[in-house]
Image: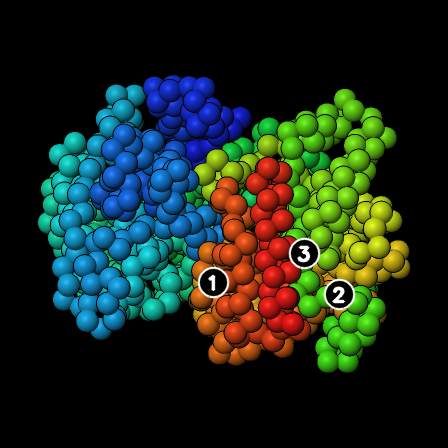
Amino acid sequence: MVWTTTHGYPGIGLKRELKKAIESFWAGESNEDDLSETARALQQQHWREQAEAGVDLIPSGDFTLYDRMLDMSLWLGAIPRRFHKENSLTGPSLLFAMARGTAQSVACPMRKWFDSNYHYIMPELDDFCPGAGEPAGSRSGAKAGAFDPDPTDLVLAFREAQAGGWDTKPTLIGPLTFLALSNADPSAIPDLLRALGPVYGLIIAALAREGADWIQLDEPALILDHTSGYWAAMEEAYAAIAAKKGASNLIVATSYGDVAEAWPALIDLPVDAIALDLVHGPHNRDRLLHSVFPSDKTLIAGVVDGRNIWRMDLAAVLSLLEVLTQKISPERLALAPSCHLFHLPYTIERETSLDPGLADRLAFARERLEELHILQVGINGGRDAIAGALEENRRRFSDHAARPGQTNSAVRERMQKLKESDYARLPYAERSPQQDAALRLPVLPTTTIGSLPQTPDLRKARARYRSGKMNGAIYRGLLQEKIRKAIGLQEELGLDVLVHGEYERADMAEFFAERLEGMTVTQHAWVQSFGTRYVRPPIIYGDIQRRGPMSVQETVYAQSLTTRPVKGMLTGPVTLLNWSFARPDLSHEQIATQLALALRDETMELEAAGIKMIQIDEPAFREGFPLKRGEWPLYLKWAVRAFRLASSGVSPQTQIHTHMCYSDFSSVIASIEAMDADVITIENSRAPLELLRVFGATGYPRGIGPGVYDVHSERVPTVGEMRVLIHRALKVLPRKNLWINPDCGLKTRRMKEVLPALTNMVAAAAQVRDELD
Ligand code: GLN
Ligand code: ZN
């Protein structure tokens, strides 16, 4: 009989219980026992829910207080030396110290997790690569330092589930993924893999002794390009792991895409089951249909989507499974979601204010379990056994297809009529002098990225306004007061280009989603972005169109208060798309085009209202890069075009800015230029040499502001530090192009940090201007 399993369940709780428990622990309002009690209750709840939904093999160890990669670092004893010195740190305090830093030690770096908006804590392995710091070549043959495995958490989770009557599958990040996503130099990875094999072996042995029937190692990194150099070492590592599995069965789980050329290495691993993503890996599907899956292994088929929220077409999935069961015996087939379910919100049940027709078509994590169960019954008992469910599934699809608002003929017609000239402005070389003449800015103009600190009173007022407890006029009055203060403050600081502060926005994607037809926001559909920061991704369900001006009122009000230019502030089409759940019936290119058209209307209205500079933020531009390099050109083509479509309607005198952050940009510079913005402000201060090396090599012929101030830290940078960064930038960038700004928006900082930091930034710019004279 075909069975079912999951790779992990969202941990944040129905009412964000985890966030509340952790933040109160941080605030010193609760202790470690309170925190572990909440964590325990949540895990129990998740096990129970999955069991009740009919999942046959439920994971343990998939729950985390902060991040699973960070957990893995701790379980392997891969703790950077600076935290050893802080003796008092143990348990969750050590975990949170590594994630967030302490007064003495900086935090471990945070990186984007695959092609998602989740950020993981990067394993820092400098102490485990004895050759680190030496040239890459001389490092081979080096033995890794002492990992110090500690499987206690995994063992306890397993036992706890067992006590509740659930025989779970301990689940951990596999060695290849742990290393490929660490800060280790690629050349050191084979040796580290060999060193980690026995270390993992100890953990597996401990779990096997507990009597775990199945143990899962997550290896999503296998779908990345360029892992082939690691396979030989990976085989050795897995041989060492398999030697310790005792009576347990091992699973290697891949997700997020095709395993591509890793296939032969994967099916040869000494494991008992392999999980493949058949939703986001169409070639995985073809490979299964056209080649031989090893008869001694179980296939765990990822058939329900762990990355998007639209219900599955159950009949179509069943057709695939019917073919698969002709090739693979039902005993060796299991069904699963395509990945860990933490990318999905918890349950659609709480979304009482969504349009019922739309809600009817959505499946969050809990609803994915229902789908899994229906599919299991259908493949084991035949379609008749699920006739009712199939009928209901069909109805959901056809009802939705007929919904008004999904197709908007005006939008479709506009898309049809797009011409090449809609994507082009007057060439930069010609429009740039016109802008200079219109704007008359000093050299090294200073600015910020858009948002200013949001205070608790503002958040409270917004919540009251949204729930109808504060009337609109009072709320808008409050916003105006904030804007007025912000403009005065920026003038006093001596900034050259001002912002209105984005006080009306809780979230830069949600804000626009609420104001666009074809998009909607949710009340409770939280998804972890990192740590206790959760976001509610908007849902794109229909054709997108502007209902009316979205940002004009606040921007124009701000501009009315000053003679200095105020930047209009929009979230770009690519970012809006990448941070939303996208409709499945249009291509990303088409959706981005619709978003771009709506934003184009907004830019033109801002311009007509006298705004001379408009910033279109694209912080998620880089994160949308497909995982396979081969697919980059296609993505870049439409993503760049969407930005151009959004920004090319304005006159040559209007200056278009963009902003990017959160990533390494070496691979994007050429595309950034193709976006044809006049100025880009870009995160830089955490890795200044890297970005400037790229510019040193290629130059950058337009306005550019590599951030001189890390907004993610409470630290106030000194004038001297920023002066150094400005001088470094001037070595590779012409002075007429250089802008001076922080790395990113200041929304989450406090005024008491922002004021001195911006004072210093303006002073640093002034000093360098003097030095240049
Ligand atoms: N304009 C936005 C802000 O300042 C940009 C945020 C971002 O890049 N994530 O908040
Ligand atoms: Zn940013």
| Dot 3 or dot 1, earlier in sequence | 3
* Colour convention of the picture: rainbow
Identify the residue position indicated by label 3 in the image: 447
Name the mark on residue 688: 1
Question: Looking at the picture, how far across and down is residue 320, in whole percent?
Answer: 44, 55
Question: Looking at the picture, how far across and down is residue 737, in whole percent?
Answer: 65, 72
| Dot 3 or dot 2, earlier in sequence | 2
Residue drawn 10% across and 49% down? 243
Q: Quarter of the image containing the C terminus?
A: bottom right
Q: Are marks 1 and 2 in contact (CB under 8 Å)?
A: no
At label 1, which amino acid type do we have? Pro
**Mark pair 3, 1: CA separation:** 19 Å
**Which secondary structure lies at badge 2?**
loop
Residue drawn 21% across and 50% down? 272
Q: Residues within 10 Å of mark 2 (few under 14, many from 20)?
A: some
Q: Nearer the viewer, residue 596 or 246?
A: 596
| Dot 1 or dot 2, earlier in sequence | 2
Q: Nearer the viewer, residue 456 or 116?
A: 456
Q: Quadrant of residue 738?
A: bottom right
Name the mark on residue 274: none
Q: Nearer the viewer, residue 231 or 48?
A: 231
Residue drawn 22% across and 73% down? 137
**Mark pair 1, 2: CA separation:** 25 Å
Q: Is residue 426 left or right of residue 242?
A: right
Question: Looking at the picture, how far across and down is residue 337, in whole percent?
Answer: 42, 45
Name the mark on residue 441: 2
Question: Looking at the picture, how far across and down is residue 26, in whole percent?
Answer: 43, 28
At label 2, which amino acid type do we have? Leu
Q: Quadrant of residue 236?
A: bottom left
Q: Are marks 3 and 2 in contact (CB under 8 Å)?
A: no
Q: Is residue 454 visible?
A: yes
At label 3, which amino acid type do we have? Thr
